[in-house]
């Protein structure tokens, strides 16, 4: 019963959170501009044409009625049709998802092990030159704006050296009904620079978190006991320290991965990566409200689902969570 109550409580919280986010997003999107002027030809359209287009899009209704209609459509799986692309909005978002998903996955596969490893080594050698260098480098990496980092990567990796392409997705291969870049060598080569632009700040964040956790765990009694028993520093670090700092690391990895899916807007725009973030920016500029709302809804659900998965993963990593 306690487990069922916990699950029901989390589901109700997630439901209320999604409702609140959809309401805020809907009001924000519908308070800016008039998409009718992007649908009709302003130079030739008459006032009657504009009025008919407004009625056809349902924009003549009060905003509360538009929101209720939106919720009703979402329940039936319909987010409307894009004003610009004339395609189902949710289908359009899903067509862009593989590009964002593979880019975020590659970036996190770089950031998670590298950041954790650097943090463990720095925490194990606290106060040394390596530790001080890592701390300064992580502060610098977290302070650099993503647009500047992206442009510097293009300058160094594409323009000055010519090693990597400056943008685009490259050659793709079809798998499970979608196009993927990581399945081809050319596609992987195109992913290097944007993946690094996403990975570098996350390497710094994860490294700082794992370093502070390592320093804390290294001073605990059970770690001293392990040293007194003659266990090697490597065994202590991997078998005892790492599991004890894994919960906050998994938390930040889950949150940052969700952030990559939602807010890789700058990186995708600079590298012309045709993902969800670039679609969101283009749709906001064009006032394509169905696509904007479909994208925001997907991002909200992804965040809530990732947080739930992280909570469940705690029980795998920490026996104390299972007992509680």
Image (cartoon, grey):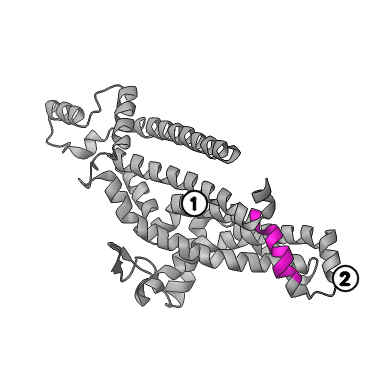
Is 226 above or below relative to 62? below
- 251 relative to 63 in the view: left or right: right
**Quick one: 240 or 151, which is closer to the camera?**
240
**For numbered disc 1, what is the local secondary structure?**
helix
- Tell me the residue at 17%/37% (across/down): 40
> In the rendered image, which quarter contains the N terminus?
top right
- 211 relative to 306 in the view: left or right: right
> In the rendered image, which quarter contains the C terminus?
top right
Instruction: Tell me residue 208's x, y (percent).
Output: 68, 59
127 in the magenta segment: no
The answer, for residue 155, to whether it is visible in the render is: yes
Q: Which residue is mark 2?
A: 228
The answer, for residue 287, to whether it is visible in the render is: no
- In this view, which residue lies farthest toward the right? 228
- Tell me the residue at 60%/38% (across/down): 2
User: What is the distance, in whole Å, between disc 1 and disc 2 at their CAs?
Assistant: 42 Å
Is 278 above or below relative to 233? above
Of marks 1 and 2, the one in the foreground: 2
Q: Which mark is residue 258?
A: 1
- Looking at the magenta stretch, what is its main secondary structure? helix
| Neighbours of disc 1 within 10 Å: few (<14), some (14-19), many (20+) | many
**Quick one: 167 or 296, which is closer to the camera?**
296
- Image quadrant assignment for residue 50: top left
Instruction: Tell me residue 305's x, y (percent).
Output: 47, 47
241 in the magenta segment: yes
Instruction: Tell me residue 135's x, y (percent).
Output: 70, 62
Instruction: Tell me residue 116's x, y (percent).
Output: 64, 65
Q: Which residues are magenta?
A: 236-247
């Amino acid at each position: 019963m306690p487990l069922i109550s916990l699950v029901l409580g989390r589901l109700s919280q997630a439901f209320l959170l999604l409702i609140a986010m959809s309401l805020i997003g809907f009001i924000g999107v519908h308070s800016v501009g008039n998409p009718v002027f992007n649908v009709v030809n302003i130079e030739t359209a008459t006032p009657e044409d504009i009025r008919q287009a407004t009625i056809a899009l349902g924009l003549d209704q009060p905003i509360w009625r538009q929101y209720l209609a939106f919720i009703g459509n979402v329940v039936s799986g319909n987010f409307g049709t894009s004003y610009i692309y004339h395609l189902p909005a949710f289908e359009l978002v899903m067509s862009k998802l593989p590009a964002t998903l593979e880019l975020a996955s590659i970036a996190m596969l770089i950031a998670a092990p590298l950041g954790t490893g650097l943090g463990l080594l720095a925490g194990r050698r606290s106060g040394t030159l390596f530790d001080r260098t890592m701390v300064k480098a992580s502060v610098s990496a977290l302070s650099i704006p993503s647009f500047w980092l992206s442009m510097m990567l293009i300058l160094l990796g594409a323009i000055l050296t010519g090693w990597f392409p400056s943008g685009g997705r490259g050659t793709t291969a079809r798998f499970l009904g979608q196009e993927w870049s990581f399945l081809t060598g050319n596609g992987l080569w195109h992913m290097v620079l944007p993946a690094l632009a996403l990975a570098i700040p996350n390497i710094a964040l994860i490294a700082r978190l794992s370093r502070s956790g390592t320093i804390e765990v290294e001073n605990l009694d059970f770690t001293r006991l392990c040293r007194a028993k003659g266990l090697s520093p490597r065994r202590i670090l991997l078998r005892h320290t790492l599991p004890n700092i894994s919960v906050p690391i998994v938390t930040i990895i889950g949150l940052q991965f969700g952030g990559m899916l939602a807010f890789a807007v700058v990186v995708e725009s600079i590298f012309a990566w045709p993902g969800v973030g670039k679609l969101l920016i283009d749709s906001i500029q064009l006032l394509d409200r169905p696509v904007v709302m479909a994208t925001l809804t997907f991002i909200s659900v992804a965040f809530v689902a990732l947080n739930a998965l992280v909570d469940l993963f705690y029980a795998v990593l920490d026996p104390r969570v299972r007992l509680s």
